[in-house]
Image (cartoon, rainbow, N blue to C red):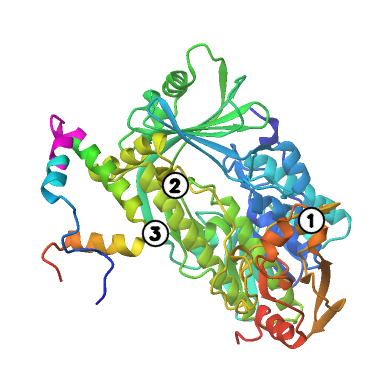
Amino acid sequence: MNKIFEVPLYPYTRHADQDAATPAHHRVVVVGAGPVGLAAAIDLARQGVEVVVLDENDKVSFGSRAICFAKRTLEIADRLGLGTPLVDKGVQWNIGKVFFDERKVYDFNLLPEEGHKRPAFINLQQYYFEDYLVRRARAIQSEGAPLDLRGGNKVARVADHGDHVALTIDTVDGPYSITADYVIACDGAASPIRSMMGLDFVGRVFEDNFLIADVIMEADFPTERWFWFDPPFNRGQSALLHKQPDGVWRIDLQLGWDIDKEQEKKPEKVIPRLKAMLGDDVEFSLEWVSIYTFQCRRMEKFRHNRVIFAGDSAHQVSPFGARGANSGLQDTDNLAWKLKLVLEGRAPEALLDSYDAERIFGADENILNSSRSTDFITPKSEISRIFRNAVLDLSEHHAFARPLVNSGRLSMPCTYDGSPLNTPDALPGGPARTRPGSPCPDVALGNGFLLDSLGDRFTLLAINADAPDGLSEDGIAVTRLSLTDKDDATGALAARYLGDAPAAVYLIRPDQHVAARWPAYDAVAIRAALRRATGQEMQ
Amino acid sequence: MPTDLILTPNMDRPDDIYADLLAAHEGLSKAESDALNARLILILMNQIGERRVLAQALAAARVPEGS
């Protein structure tokens, strides 16, 4: 077993807060040091917002768990300063193949265009992802960022007092209390914070079991996502094969509902299943075995005044589509800049309600996509199985059926259509993919990439257009980035940002989403859009 | 209410077309016939293409006597 599971990364140490006469006060407390909690803390702390992370454990999560990290997550990681180690360690892939019975029926490319710094996906064990986040947290700490990571700290009580939150924390040295301006609950699908606050978490249970086996083997399968419907080695069920770093392969086998989970987890049951799939002559060893079921559900609201839920604590989906951890990272990407502006008194508290609006919209999109994938993968009736098999049979021979094949609609960033922060599209002929609410698509620019020059602040992106160096409205500064379509010889900049328009000016949010766009610089319109994008009109 | 779904006679040789449909199923088991019907529906859905028209077709199929 990989040593990384055994090393305490943030062991418990006694903190001065535990000896304070009155509870110490902090700006933000993040509960949970998983991928979402750590990303939230790094994002805030590197922008100067004081943050304490509490976790009852002190190690990375056990087993590979989330393994598929999407392009958008890598772009967010770039903004946080850890994209490169993730991509260097991860296995990059863009291609998926679908098999039905004994035949390959279809393959797809998730990133069929050039000009992106990051691949469609990398596969990387969750424990590496967490390990790199902890290292990044340590690095910014050493540069003076106000981030405090406390292991062995279990939240026992949380109470929202309107203008602050009080927390009681259990440790091996006994309990202590602190207060915070805001709490971000990133404590996972079984969220104790959610339970303590008596909040609902309703949705749909899927009656099916899946076996995860991480095996170590020398195999010459390509670095692609392979998905089987009804294969000879797992009749009537599905199977998935994915490559991870270190010669580890993720195998996911559908088992059905009426099984004995304890029996199915035993090596004497697992190994014959894997041999049937891989062949008798492939040498392998088991690194991790787990059986999971899943639900698709979300909280009715993610923001409960000063306690804000992010990641699995707020929403849960089936794993088909890699929409769990990836959507959690989009949550923190969305929340961090808003919380920073509110804490600094530069935006009204109402801006935080746009987190609810935008991320509930995202969660619903993820739940819809993953529920549909699950209905295709595990048909719930005889007739749905007949149609499913008809789609697969036709997809082998006819292109029209291929878009219907659904082995997981893999995580794409959410476009916040209808967000209260958007200003209506004012760029005639502008491409739909960069309409207000969209995450900015990357473009290669001579010596770098567009996304690396956006983020953390509001940016005015002027393409073939004149605009002043910057402007400021109610204490919010906007920096200009001037480009011409000559900056990108491939034409991707024009295709992605101009469409049929000769020039464009974009207002881009700190999370790299488009807030507004126009055919030319218009100071009055830009100031109005900036007020809108910072929640001034939401009060 | 205007509709794009054609519910008036539109087949050029109805008796021949109907006979073709039955002939395609001849000699098939129930399971094979179900599979053929499913493939046929998907092919025709693609031919129609528009979700709006297909929704009208689904509604008409669900309530054959009309609303």
Task: Tell which circle, 2 or 1, labels the residue nearer the N-terminal end.
Answer: 2
Q: Give how far apart the Cα atoms at labels 2 and 3 are.
A: 27 Å
Q: Are marks 2 and 1 in contact (CB under 8 Å)?
A: no
Is residue A440 visible to the viewer in this orientation of the structure? no
Magenta stretch: give its range.
B21-32
Q: Up-down: is A20 above or below A487?
A: below
| Percent coordinates x, y for residue A37 in the rendering | 65, 57
Which residue, given by chain and number where applicable, does mark 1 sit on? A488
Q: Amino acid at mark 3?
A: Gly
Task: Tell which circle, 1 or 3, labels the residue nearer the N-terminal end.
Answer: 3
Residue B23 is one of the magenta-drawn residues: yes
Q: Give how far apart the Cα atoms at labels 1 and 3 are.
A: 46 Å
Image quadrant occupied by the C terminus of chain A: bottom right
Q: Amino acid at mark 1?
A: Asp
Label 2 neighbourhood size at 10 Å, few (<14), some (14-19), many (20+)?
Answer: few
Chain assignment, label 3: A
Q: Give how far apart the Cα atoms at labels 2 and 1 are.
A: 32 Å
Which residue, given by chain and number where applicable, does mark 2 sit on? A403
Q: Nearer the viewer, residue A20 or A346?
A: A346
At numbered mark 3, what does the secondary structure look like: helix, strand or loop? Answer: strand
Q: Give me the residue at 62% from left, 81% from top.
A: A350
Q: Which mark is residue A203?
A: 3
Residue positioned most to the top? A281
Q: Is residue A342 left or right of residue A306?
A: right
| Percent coordinates x, y for residue A536 in the rendering | 66, 85
| Percent coordinates x, y for residue A93 in the rendering | 63, 38
* Picture quadrant of residue A52: bottom right
Residue A27 is one of the magenta-drawn residues: no
Image quadrant occupied by the N terminus of chain A: top right
At numbered mark 1, what does the secondary structure look like: helix, strand or loop? Answer: loop
